[in-house]
Image: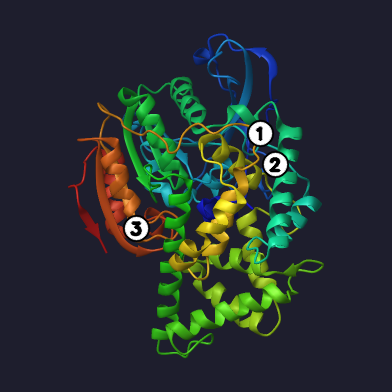
Amino acid sequence: MPNPFRIRAAALTAALALSSLPTGCGDDSKGGDLTAQNLVWKSCPAPDAAEGGGDAPSPLPGGGSWECATMRAPLDWPNPKGATIGLALIRARASGDASERIGSLIFNFGGPGGSGVTTLPAFGADYTALRTRYDLVSFDPRGVGRSDPVECEDDAQLDNYFQQDATPDTSAERTQLIKRTKQFNAACEKNSQTILPHVPTTDAARDMDLMRQVLGDRQLHYFGISYGTELGGVYAHLFPKNVGRAVFDAVVDPTQDPEQSSLGQAKGFQLALDNFAEDCTSKKAECPIGDTPQDVKDRIARLLADLDRKPIPGILPRWLTQTAATNGIAQSLYSKDFWEYLTEGLEEAYDGDGKILMLLSDAMNGRSQNGEYSNITAANIAINCADQKPRYTADYIQRKVPEFRAASPLFGDFLAWGMASCTNWAVPGAADHPDVSAPGSAPILVVGNTGDPATPYEGAKKMVDALGKGVGVELTYKGQGHGAYDSKNKCVQGAVNGYLLEGTVPKAGTVCT
């Protein structure tokens, strides 16, 4: 099983538009001077299945429409004059006076594997203030959505894949999990062998610098969220002099290897679950899923143990398994706004109805209600495995399970066994962790959320230190959920907007509550 917990909730639940121009992996066209290409912007069609499906983006507030285009980039960056691929872009033109326009503000919403072309319009209203001086731009990174997507298994096979037991308790179950993982990885190699070697984060960072030039910007102005902070850090390392005004929100710890990252997430999601249980039982109204915080967690643990023995009806013909329920619970912890759905989903599951928890799990896995999957799982695994050098065996993971279980009785096993996803991958990984050192870069505002489950708060300080002296500026938000800006906290948004719009760097160590 992959480790899906780094996939940002927004990137999974958003569904909107994309470029109408075709792309093709290993296109016969040659690179030439790709910085001189002219993008052809057109109205955005509805996103295809790989992007998550749905409707074309709605008109922009105050008039105007989203525009989409395809940018050509080298398939193989060491051979920039060779074959090219197409990268899908979306933009909303700046709404303010042309004389006040700063340039383009490029977004990456995380994953890796999330479609920026569908996510930006879904959350575009949150960035209305930023649009006064920027063209808002996002993209499907290489291997994602319509940007030469990684393809592995079909929808029916993915239904089977996500029904498997991802927390094996016996030798036979462990053997079956590794066997099924090998089958999935073999399908990726068979169906996507051309693109698989060319999806690491370093290549996506080079794509962004090409994008900067094609869009006509002297510097890259950037807003990265979740994995997007890792991508932004890698960009700053490769092109420090090209960094303009940049914000990292929901910050990945760049110093951790995959094992350390997964263990950190176990602690982060356990903290979020603790906070959810405390919130439910502290209200005046009776908490319907437990009398005390510990009672809430004990009942959830019993539910998962029961599901491991006997699943309950979910969205038939699929059943709610222990794995699907764990996945659904994790999805609901990405935002405090989802906590009411978790409460309702648990209530129904205790009564034998698994629909809500399965809907939450489907959102995490990129499954639409018509049974089609986006390629977010395939892209997530492909990019992570291209980036991450370690390959963990079943025996090694089994020895580590107690440590993960101590970090989180609920999520520990799941996250430990998620480390097996790259073990039999066709392409070697690049490094233990990314290099984000960026001496000479402009200041980068690094925003950490103390209650973030997916990218724990400690990662923000680690990112600041790794970027180097005088580059990273840390801001703390004492809140819940994944990320800070979309919480609509006025202090956070004021600091971020002040930097991106006016160039005002907040005082390092600023705390927002």
Callout count: 3
Amino acid type at circle 1 is: Ala
Amino acid type at circle 2 is: Asn
Q: How is the image coloured?
A: rainbow
Q: Secondary structure at mark 2?
A: helix
Return the residue at label 2: 185
Q: Residue at x 60, y 43 (%)?
A: 422
Classify 30 as above or below 482.
above
Return the residue at label 3: 449
What is the C-alpha distance between the residues marked 3 and 1?
36 Å
Whether pointer 1 and pointer 2 mark residues with C-beta atoms closer than 8 Å, the reply is yes
Return the residue at label 1: 426
Q: Residue at x 42, y 48 (%)?
A: 127
User: In the rendered view of the protein, which quadrant contains the C terminus?
Assistant: bottom left
Classify 53 as above or below 429.
below
Q: Secondary structure at mark 3?
A: strand
